[in-house]
Image (cartoon, grey):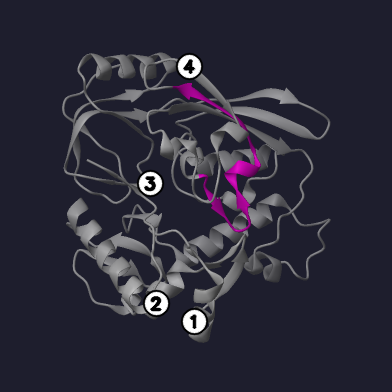
Amino acid sequence: MKLATPFALPNTLALPAWADFGAELETPDDVCEAIQFARAHRAPLRILGAGSNVIVAPQVAGFVGRMSIVGIDVVDETDSTITIRVGGGENWHQLVLRCITNGWYGIENLALIPGTVGAAPVQNIGAYGAELADFVVEVEGFDDVGRTITLDNERCGFGYRSSIFQLQPGLTITHVRLQLQKVFRPRLGYPGLRKQFAHNRLKTLTARQVADAVIAMRQARLPDPDRHPNVGSFFKNPVVSAELVETIRALGLDAYLEGDGYKLSAAQLIDYCGWKDKPAEKVACWPNQALVLVNQGGAKAADVLTYAAAIRADVQARLGVALVQEPTKIQ
């Protein structure tokens, strides 16, 4: 591990941010060394990938490591499935494309989601009718004192955009094992995909066609973080009671049954309150997707959080719905 002080923090919001100490973590030994360094200096330890789901303060106390462990290895194989062990520093989207090329199927609906493989279980990434939890066999890493851990799917505590790794941020992910299929079975539960491929014969539909459709839909709605800095969806889709849902539906907004409640579209709520068309300086909603907040130039963490708080307060006051922030604040 090559220590840097100060250490520039990666983040797709393009916020200027530095940590007191940091390093690229290229091996499990580097991660263990980082944990021991932080403990010895009684400093907070945080591990980032691409920084695609974080809001970083200008100055972050302690040690920040960038997860850079790479490698994709086949660890188990049957006639119908293949299990791969992937380094936490691998780019998620590139993994999806490589799996399609190799004839390993299942995660094509998750194409073009930004970030690294190691960060994917933390948020339990999901899109277009699929989520990571459907494919995780186990997760490897370290606890907060440097002991190795292996958590199977159940112990990861996956939920909607949530996992045990959010409740226990001291856990560091170094590798993820995924079980994929050798025979492609398209997941077309998402209305947009189902409509697009309504006239295709399922036997001739390919994983690459599904991935390309997902990529096209994401590019049409979501900004490229390299050109318009953002962290993707800034708020979770809220789940409300049956009593409140009637009011929401009366306004012409969507609501879908979810367990004992109803899931709403956070983007629709924000758009209904007029935020998509509001002029703004440093931070604004993306014109094609109100759920995405974009750094228009020169924004700092405080600017992003202030803008987000104003949206939350407005939606709560007008519609009685509490929005929950998705990205994690690091300071």
**For marks 1 and 2 on the same chain, the one whose residue lies earlier in the sequence:** 1
Q: Which residue corresponds to the image point at 57% horizontal and 32% vertical from the top-left?
A: 155
**Image x and y of residue 121, in percent:** 51, 39
Task: Characterize the local packing of mark 1: few (<14), some (14-19) or many (20 or more) Cα atoms within 10 angstroms.
Answer: few
**Residue 83 as seen in the image, left or right of residue 185:** left
Q: Which residue corresponds to the image point at 23% horizontal and 76% vertical from the top-left?
A: 279
Q: Which segment is the magenta one?
A: 124-142
Task: Characterize the local packing of mark 3: few (<14), some (14-19) or many (20 or more) Cα atoms within 10 angstroms.
Answer: many
**Image x and y of residue 305, in percent:** 24, 57
Q: Is 289 part of what is drawn in magenta?
A: no
Disc marking residue 319: 2
The residue tagged 1 is 247
Q: Amino acid at mark 3?
A: Ser
* Label 2 secondary element: helix
**For marks 3 and 4 on the same chain, the one whose residue lies earlier in the sequence:** 3
The residue tagged 3 is 52
| Mark pair 4, 1: CA separation | 50 Å
**For marks 4 and 1 on the same chain, the one whose residue lies earlier in the sequence:** 4
Q: Are marks 3 and 4 in contact (CB under 8 Å)?
A: no
Q: Are marks 3 and 1 in contact (CB under 8 Å)?
A: no
